[in-house]
Image (cartoon, rainbow, N blue to C red):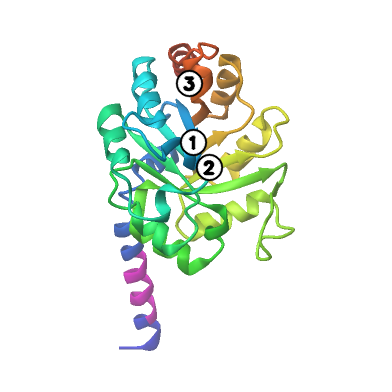
């Protein structure tokens, strides 16, 4: 067999391996590539500190999850501000919350080391957000992808056209180029965390959707009204979730049912 034929066969084998490993898990991204529009969902996010879960049977996150589902939540997000949940053995209350909610639960809690990323793998979460500080280490990112597959979502802290507090490997690179590099490594889902708080970056999100085809985005930023959700839905099929503060939903200042209705109508 000639060297040229062997080389071509090796490339084909690697290509088939890639398709088998990654095409099926990201069916949503495959649908997007075919032009299909998946509905954007508005997800209330429960942000908590270590002292909120230190004691007590009816912990605030569990109680809030129950109330959010009663208010119409179709998915719930947990934001562990101190990174306490994944720092040791996963607490029993997380399983209680998942059971009580009865809807998909996504988790975002300073997952920046291999042990933390592995620790939440069997927790029954629908989405696991890996911290930005970890995703620029290729071996750690590969580990996270292998561990979580389609559940993995990569955090990107966006400061205008650049990554906020970027590591040396991404310093000075535009956001779109950073995302393209991560997409090339196998990442398909991103949490776009807007650190500016200066309105909605619609144009930038549309550019990212166009320049990184097949990527899916959840957005966290200055979402204060149902009208903001309607605007974000204009981004199109690349946007699959908009995170809003759970406190606003429970206080009655943000109508979750109306927001999901408006988001669905914007896609029709």
Which residue corresponds to the image point at 67% horizontal and 39% vertical from the top-left? 195
Q: Which residue is mark 3?
A: 267
First along the sequence among labels 1 and 3: 1
Residue 144 at x, y = what percent? 41, 59
- Left or right, residue 57 beside residue 78: left
As rendered, which of 47 and 17 lies closer to the eye? 47
Residue 253 position (above or below residue 21): above
Q: Determine the secondary structure under disc 2.
A: loop
**Number of dots carrying numbers:** 3
Label pair 2/1, CB-CB below 8 angstroms: yes
Q: Is residue 39 magenta?
A: no
Residue 172 occupies which quadrant of the picture? bottom right
Q: Determine the secondary structure under disc 3.
A: helix
First along the sequence among labels 3 and 2: 2
Disc 2 from disc 1: Cα separation: 6 Å
- Please name which of the two marks, 1 or 3, marks the residue nearer to the observer: 1
Question: Is residue 22 among what the camera can see?
Answer: no
Residue 10 at x, y = what percent? 35, 76
The magenta stretch spans which residues? 7-15
As rendered, which of 101 and 21 lies closer to the eye? 101
Residue 175 at x, y = what percent? 66, 49
Residue 73 occupies which quadrant of the picture? top left
Disc 1 from disc 3: Cα separation: 32 Å
- Left or right, residue 196 beside residue 79: right
Q: Determine the secondary structure under disc 1.
A: strand
Q: Which residue is mark 1?
A: 48
Q: Could you classify mark 1 by the number of other residues whose Cα lies within 10 Å: few (under 14), some (14-19), or many (20 or more)?
A: some
Q: Which residue is mark 2?
A: 81
Disc 3 from disc 2: Cα separation: 33 Å
First along the sequence among labels 2 and 1: 1
Which residue corresponds to the image point at 70% horizontal and 57% vertical from the top-left? 173
Question: Is residue 145 among what the camera can see?
Answer: yes
């Amino acid at each position: 067999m000639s060297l040229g034929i062997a080389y071509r066969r090796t490339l084909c084998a690697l290509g088939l391996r890639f398709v088998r490993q990654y095409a099926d898990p990201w069916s949503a991204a495959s649908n997007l590539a075919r032009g299909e529009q998946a509905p954007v969902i508005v997800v209330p996010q429960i942000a908590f500190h270590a002292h909120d879960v230190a004691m007590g049977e009816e912990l605030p996150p569990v109680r809030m999850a129950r109330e959010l589902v009663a208010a119409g939540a179709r998915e719930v997000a947990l934001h562990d501000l101190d990174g306490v949940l994944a720092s040791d053995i996963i607490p029993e209350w997380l399983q209680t919350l998942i059971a009580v909610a009865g809807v998909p639960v996504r988790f975002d809690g300073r997952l920046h080391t291999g042990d933390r990323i592995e620790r939440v793998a069997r927790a029954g979460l629908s989405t696991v957000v890996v911290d930005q500080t970890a995703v620029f280490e290729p071996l750690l990112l590969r580990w996270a992808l292998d561990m979580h597959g389609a559940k993995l979502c990569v955090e990107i802290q966006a400061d205008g056209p650049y990554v906020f507090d970027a590591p040396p490997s991404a310093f000075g690179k535009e956001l779109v180029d950073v995302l393209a590099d991560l997409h090339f490594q196998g990442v398909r889902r991103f949490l776009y965390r807007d650190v500016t708080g200066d309105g909605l970056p619609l144009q930038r999100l549309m550019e990212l959707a166009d320049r990184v085809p097949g990527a899916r985005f959840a957005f966290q930023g200055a979402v204060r009204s149902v009208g903001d959700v309607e605007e974000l839905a204009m981004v199109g099929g690349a946007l699959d979730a908009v995170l809003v503060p759970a406190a606003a939903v429970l206080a009655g200042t943000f109508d979750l049912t109306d927001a999901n209705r408006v988001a669905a109508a914007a896609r029709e």
